[in-house]
Amino acid sequence: MTQSKTTTNRSLLTVLFLGVLMGALDIAIVGPALPAIQTAFGIDERAAAWIFTIYVLFNLIGAPLMSKLSDRYGRRSVYVADVTFFAIGSLAVALAPSFSLLLAGRALQGLSAGGIFPVASAVIGDTFPEDKKGSALGMIGAVFGLAFIVGPILGGVLLIWGWQWLFLVNLPVAALVILLGMRNLPTTRPAVAKPFDLLGMAALAVALTGLTLGINRLDTTAIGGSLLSPQVWPWLALALAAGAAFVWLEGRAADPIIRLGQFGNRQLVLANFLSMGAGLGEAAMVFLPALAIAAFGVSQSRASFLLLPVVLAVAVGSPLGGRLLDSYGARPVVMAGTILLAVGMFLLGLWGTNFVAFIVAGVFIGFGLASLLGAPIRYIVLGEAAPSERAASQGVVTIATGVGQLISGALIGAVAASQGGGVDGYSVSYLFVGSAALILVLLSLGLKSRQARQV
């Protein structure tokens, strides 16, 4: 690689790194703001949960929408637009005079952030040589570990001046990313633009909305009866009907949001199931402080610090996994990661009340998640998807991860409640997640070896 090409790629990585960091930090630092927001708007815990829920929902909608738009109109324009709208959403949240307008700002943040990581991954696929893609994706994946280390600390500091500053801090970062993006991001786009699949996008949005609302309204203490309640089943039925309509529409669209033909590619199907499992494992970590409080009697703040082994392992494992990809390929890296994830979950389920086992489990889980949330799955998708579908395929991976997160919260809550909560409830929950991780190990056996990918 020439010196000028190396410099260009470093500039690109800087733009992509900062954009993804901004989106990742917004998830990590919003937690400390919740009590202050509840007090400011006089809302209860159920309403406060929507600050997360509406972000996740619109993030899932934004991932395929923004990814497809970048395949259609070019990476630079869509990436810069995503960062711009994210900044506008941040400003709307900080200045919101009512809780409903705050949720509108969060929705705009989620919609735009949904495209930042998939489009960044597609830019790497477009511009980096084959032997450097893994390392570049690993660096981008490591951003999430960095964000979850810095985020709570930064959030605590900014809260001194008011919760609004947790969102206003995005504005100067966004301005820098926009400036650098206009200078460095590629402008490639297809020669002929096909009609945009508006009906398909609408059906997908309705399906994801129904799924989110249905899962969000589940009563995890009586999961069977809750599924049949009028608060839940109509939303899940709507999601099923809209999902079926989406499949029908995509099969007839000139330029579908998600090309159904890619699901005829076994490697892409495996990658998306593995991503769903990654979301399952990632969301399970939300309940780790609750297990720590029940098992060790620590305070809520100390329990949050017990997540550090997971976070540090993700931060170290993501770039390490990227480097191993370039040398060994995706299959051994993903297989090792799924095994570590399963071992870590079973350690929590069987010996979670032992402090040493708790910490070791966190390290195993962190390295396991790094192989699924970071570079390897994205690397597989870049290699299997057509160049014109790279960003859209990355968007599908993001959707799969989000669906796994939604299911995980309901699953763990239901299992824990059925076991009476406390240590016993969460221990059984982690055994369930560990069993799911074993399925991921089996799925990883179906991935291509490095030699097969090069044929």
Image (cartoon, rainbow, N blue to C red):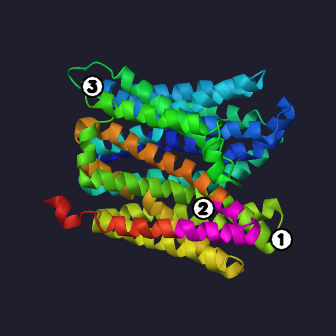
Q: Which residue is mark 2?
A: 311
What residue type is disc 3 on? Ala
305 left or right of 144 in image: right
Q: CA distance from mark 1 to mark 3?
A: 56 Å
**Region of the chain picked out in magenta, as a range:** 415-434
- Residue that appears at 71% across and 55% down: 221
CA distance for labels 3 and 2: 42 Å
Identify the mark at residue 297; answer none if there is no mark. Answer: 1
Count neighbours of disc 3 (C-alpha within 10 A) and say few if under 14, some if 14 to 19, many if 20 or more.
Answer: some
Task: Give residue 275's quadrant in the image.
Answer: bottom left
- For residue 253, the mark is 3
Among the two numbered marks 1 and 3 on one chain, the one whose residue lies closer to the N terminus: 3
Viewport quadrant of the C terminus: bottom left
> Residue 113 versus residue 49: which sits nearer the camera?
49
Query: Measured along the vertical axis of the image, is residue 202 above or below residue 269?
Result: above
Residue toward you, 78 or 409 = 409
In percent of width and height, residue 190 lies at 23, 26
Residue 1 can be seen, yes or no = no
Instruction: Select label 2 or label 1 by which is in front.
Output: 1
In whole angstroms, how far apart are the C-alphas of marks 2 and 1?
A: 22 Å
Residue 417 is marked as: none
> In this view of the protein, which residue sits in the foreground, 73 or 139?
73
Looking at numbered disc 2 in the image, what kind of residue is underneath it? Val
Seen in the picture, residue 415 relative to 141 is either above or below; the reply is below
Percent x, y for residue 417? 71, 60
Which residue is rendered at x = 34% and y = 37% of the image?
392
Q: Earlier in the sequence, mark 2 or mark 1?
A: 1
Q: In screen coordinates, is 32 left or right of 244?
A: right
